[in-house]
Image (tube, rainbow, N blue to C red):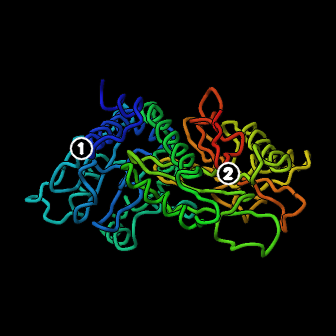
Amino acid sequence: MSLLLAAASQAQVLSVRDQATVVNELLADRFEHLLPAAMEQTGIDMWVVVAREYNEDPVLKTMLPAEWLNARRRTILVFYRDGKSGKVERLAVARYNVGKSITAAWDMKKFPDQWAALVDIIKQRNPVKIALNTSANFGHADGIDHTEYTELLAALPADYKRRVVSAEPLAVRWLETRTEREMQIYPQLVNATHKIIEEGFSERVITPGITTADDVVWWFRQKIRDLGYDTWFHPSVEIQRQGKGLANPDIIIPGDLLHVDIGITYLRLNTDIQQHAYVLKPGETAAPKALVQAFANANRVQDILLSQFQQGRSGNQMLAAALRQATAENLQPTIYTHPIGYHGHAAGPAIGMWDMQGGVPGTGDEQLRYRTAYSIELNAATAIPGYQEPVRIMLEEDAYFDESGIRYINGRQKELLLLPRRAPNVE
């Protein structure tokens, strides 16, 4: 069994060395198959990615081999697509090859100056467009810093300066598109995140009347690290409780509705999951019906949003349509769904933000494309007697969109986890 299939089929975390092997396999596959298609689709025949050590362009970080933790001095990558053959050259204006996929192309004796070496490569290939990572909408695609941009432009002859364009469309395609091999692995990541939540929201971790929300937060953080994963943000645990001032608001007690937001990083991919648990009161064997209905309301908002996924629609169009339908069904929705992949909050169409329910300028205008992944993040508010504020069921589950439609990568939570007795929560 290959390391890639092992990563997909087993729950165990690979050794650091084996992870590096898989990362490099995935990267080689992306360079060979994804990049040429993305350059053709966006009409960009030359992409120049520039960064210096410890000030890496977000795109460049995704292109480095696993053995490179940072750029080295100034690292310049050049991707040139020949219009006739469709083949893409992968060159590095660097002292050595960048892994096995990008060939060093700097003759330091002939061109002691690195910028002069880059200009020579450009002149030899005479591209129609020279794309640099500048973007007003996506920080991920805005990675060339002021110094590198200024020096590069100063080195270019006037005719080539006129060919400089933003690489935003290409950078977004590179970052947002998931390959078939990556999607063999992604279910393991999401399943692992679900299992961490199930354990964290159980009697193994929580003792009502003693355990605080912050105790559980740090348990999640430590558990993620102990298992061999990393996390791209600090977890959070929140309590919604009936009444006011009846107990220490930080200590978990029976009757509490718990919420967690966590995400893990593994093999350069990220998850982002939010789920809920209910702490049973003495004598209870199930959550109160009002909370069960509140949870069902949030599941319904998920269904409504997923029904809007169609290639070519913008994030803002999907947001507006989903909110209209949910409101017509007397739900109280807030939708703030985002792409996920190489980054937790990734490049691609934003489908609302919690404080922008009328649409998101720029990123919300981006159109939905196949082979992209999303964190279906939203909440539904339900007024329940005894609660000072409407109860918000805040759900987030990772999903994948392709020609067959939108599907959850590892199911979704359809009922509250229960403490102390745990119940299945993933469909």
Residue extending farthest to the top is 1
Quadrant location of the N terminus in the rendered image: top left
Q: Gap in Å between the C-alphas at discs 2 and 1?
A: 36 Å
Residue at point 50% right, 57% down? 220
Q: Is residue 290 above or below residue 162?
A: above
Q: Position of residue 378 (x, y in %)?
A: 71, 52
Mark sitting on residue 276: 2
Q: Position of residue 423 (x, y in %)?
A: 65, 39
Residue at point 82% right, 56% down? 381
Taking depth in this image into account, of 5 and 76 the one nearest to the observer is 5
Q: Is residue 170 visible?
A: no
Q: Quadrant of residue 101?
A: top left
Nearest to viewer (mark 2 / mark 1): 2
Taking depth in this image into account, of 383 and 336 the one nearest to the observer is 383
Q: Position of residue 387 (x, y in %)?
A: 84, 64
Relative horizontal placement of residue 352, taking residue 30 as reference (left or right): right
Taking depth in this image into account, of 14 and 371 the one nearest to the observer is 14
Q: Quadrant of residue 213?
A: bottom right
Q: Which residue is mark 1?
A: 17
Amino acid carrying label 1: it is: Arg
Taking depth in this image into account, of 282 and 261 the one nearest to the observer is 282
Residue at point 30% right, 51% down? 64
Q: Is residue 196 visible?
A: yes
Q: Position of residue 165 (x, y in %)?
A: 47, 57
Query: How busy is the neighbourhood of tag 2: few (under 14 within 10 Å), some, or many (20 plus)?
Result: many
Amino acid carrying label 2: it is: His
Mark sitting on residue 4: none
Q: Is residue 211 above or below residue 276?
A: below
Badge 2 element: strand
Quadrant location of the C terminus in the rendered image: top right
